[in-house]
Image (tube, rainbow, N blue to C red):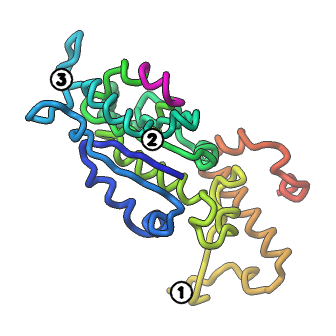
Amino acid sequence: MRIDVFSIFPEYLAALDLSLIGKARQDGLLDVRVRDLRDFTDDRHRTVDDTPYGGGAGMVMKPEPWAQALGTALDGAAEEGARPTLIVPSPAGEVFTQQTAYELAAEDHLVFACGRYEGIDERVLEWAGEHFDVRPMSLGDYVLNGGEVAVLAMVEAIGRLVPGVVGNPESLVEESHSDGLLEYPVYTKPSQWRERPIPEVLLSGNHAKIARFRRDEQLRRTSERRPDLIARLDPSTLDKADKAT
Ligand SMILES: COc1ccc(Cn2ccc3ccc(-c4cc(N)[nH]n4)cc32)cc1
């Protein structure tokens, strides 16, 4: 998978050189290219913003640098008839979920446009729609100062689902949100820690009982912390034993 990221703070994306995503880049599983939007300006001050038409506080990102930058992500794609997905972090976007991560992990080429200031001139998204599948994307209902933090989160959530990136694919199966439920609590040595034991069933060696305990914990946690997820559960997710819980 190729991932292009454009930002006026490319150093913000240095975290993508580290850990799992960094190793996947070294292994050639992910081709992540981070570019400075200012490299696509044509004035000596490398200007990327200007005052908003209609007035109002703050500045708006100029359209031309974005068109020049995004155009470089298209090189080669057009010939293959490819239509990359352009993700534009925004407080006004669709909310990014694990389902979104699965969908995007199946794409060959993702492009991320990190806005700043009050956002990007809307005509950029209109123009981009001729060449990309454009998806304004929100991390959640809170306000950030720009798109970089959102891109770090999304690239990690998507990248880890790309085959080969996570060593043991098993670990992707039983995790929060993979089956619509929150994950169960985990424990490790020592079995007694500051007078706190671990749930006895985990020492029983009875795998059926352990699986039941973990499933019950998933259901308990989800109904306590995220009742909204219970309401959205696909009925087929719950088996007979679950319903008895
Ligand atoms: C009009 O309201 C606002 C307009 C812009 C901003 C600052 N800003 C500039 C670019 C940018 C990209 C993403 C986000 C963002 C995404 C989520 N989930 N929260 N905040 C914020 C962003 C704040 C608020």
Number of the front mark, 1 or 3: 3
The amino acid type found where label 3 is placed reads Asp
User: Which tag, 1 or 3, sits closer to the chain's start?
Assistant: 3
**Vertical relation: 80 (above or below) 62:** below
Image coords of residue 213 (percent x, y): 76, 70
Residue in the image at 63% along x and 52% along y: 224
Mark 1 closeness class: few <14, some 14–19, many ≥20 residues within 10 Å: few
The span from disc 2 to disc 1 (Cα, nearest Å) is 47 Å
Q: Is residue 131 magenta?
A: yes
Q: Is mark 1 within 8 Å of ligand 1?
A: no
The span from disc 1 to disc 3 (Cα, nearest Å) is 58 Å
Q: Is mark 2 within 8 Å of ligand 1?
A: no
Image coords of residue 11 (percent x, y): 26, 54
Can residue 36 be seen from the camera position used here? yes
Find residue 111 and name its label: 2
The amino acid type found where label 1 is placed reads Trp
Reading the image, the residue beneath label 1 is 193
Reading the image, the residue beneath label 3 is 50
Q: In the displayed structure, does residue 60 sit left or right of residue 132?
A: left
Identify the image quadrant of residue 73: top left
Number of the front mark, 2 or 1: 2
**Vertical relation: 123 (above or below) 202:** above
Q: Residue furthest top?
A: 54
Mark 3 lies on a secondary structure that is strand
Which range of residues does the magenta coloring cover?
Answer: 126-133
Q: Is residue 15 magenta?
A: no
Q: State the residue in front, 180 or 109.
A: 109
The span from disc 2 to disc 3 (Cα, nearest Å) is 24 Å
Can residue 139 be seen from the camera position used here? no
Q: Do the residues bearing badges 2 and 1 touch, measured as CB atoms within 8 Å?
A: no
Image coords of residue 72 (percent x, y): 37, 38
